[in-house]
Amino acid sequence: MYSLARKVSLLLFVFQPTNLIACDIGILQIKFFDLHSKIKVEVADSHQERKKGLMFRDSLDPDSGMLFVYDHPQKVGFWMKNTLVALDIVFADSKGTVIKVAQNNKPLSLDVIRGGENIQYVLEVNAGKSEELNLFKGAKLYHPAIYSGLAEDC
C-alpha cells in the first residue's frame, strides 16, 4: 500500500504546473519580460543555406521568418543584396538573448548590417514585425536549435 506522502508526490509530479515553452523545429518562441509571442521559421544552419537566406524571394509570409544558426558565437554582418523584401534583422548571442535589432532594412541594399561580436543566431522577419513580436534588446529566443541553459529550454 502506498503512503499518503508517496501518493501526494506522485500526484504533484503528474499534475505539476509547468511554464516550460513547448518547442517545435518550425516555431520560434519569444519572451520579453511577461510578453510571449511566436513565429514560424525556416532554419538556415548550413553554410549554403545561410549564404542564400531570403534572397530572390518576392515575399515573406507575414507570420514567418528565417532563423540563421551558426556553430559558434562570432562576429556577423548581413546585407540585403538580392533580397527583394524589406526586413528587420535580429541578432542574438549563444543563449538566445537578443543583442541588437536592425529595423527596416531596405531591399537590395549593399550596406553591411553589423550584429556585433559573439552572435550565434540571427532572425530575419518582415520590416516592422520585430516590434509586433516584442523582439527588443534583452528578449529571449526559444527554439530547439538554441540552448540557453535555462529550465525553459526545449
Image (cartoon, rainbow, N blue to C red):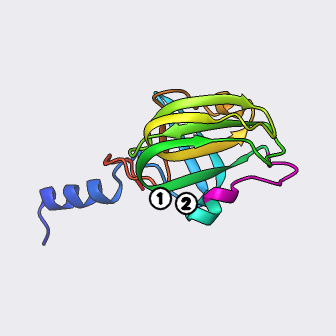
Residue drawn at (65%, 27%), measured in percent from left and top? Answer: 131
Which badge, 1 or 2, comes first in the chain's sequence?
A: 2
Q: Which residue is mark 2?
A: 24
103 lies left or right of 33: right
* Residue 50 percent across, percent down from the top left: 61, 57
Residue 36 at least partly seen: no
Q: Which residue is mark 1?
A: 144
Q: Name the amino acid type tagged 2.
A: Asp
Q: Give the class, few, some or many, for how many residues have Cα within 10 Å of label 1's Cα (few <14, many ≥20).
A: some
> Gap between marks 1 and 2, in whole Å?
7 Å
Q: Name the amino acid type tagged 1.
A: Pro
* Residue 90 percent across, percent down from the top left: 58, 37
Question: Residue 23 versus residue 12: which sits nearer the camera?
Answer: 23
Question: Residue 44 versus residue 77: which sits nearer the camera?
Answer: 77
User: Is there a contact, CB below 8 Å, between mark 1 and mark 2?
Assistant: yes
Q: Residue furthest front?
A: 110
Q: Is residue 54 magenta?
A: yes
Residue 52 at least partly seen: yes
80 lies left or right of 50: right
Residue 53 position by quadrant = bottom right
Q: Which residues are magenta?
A: 50-61
SS class, disc 2: loop
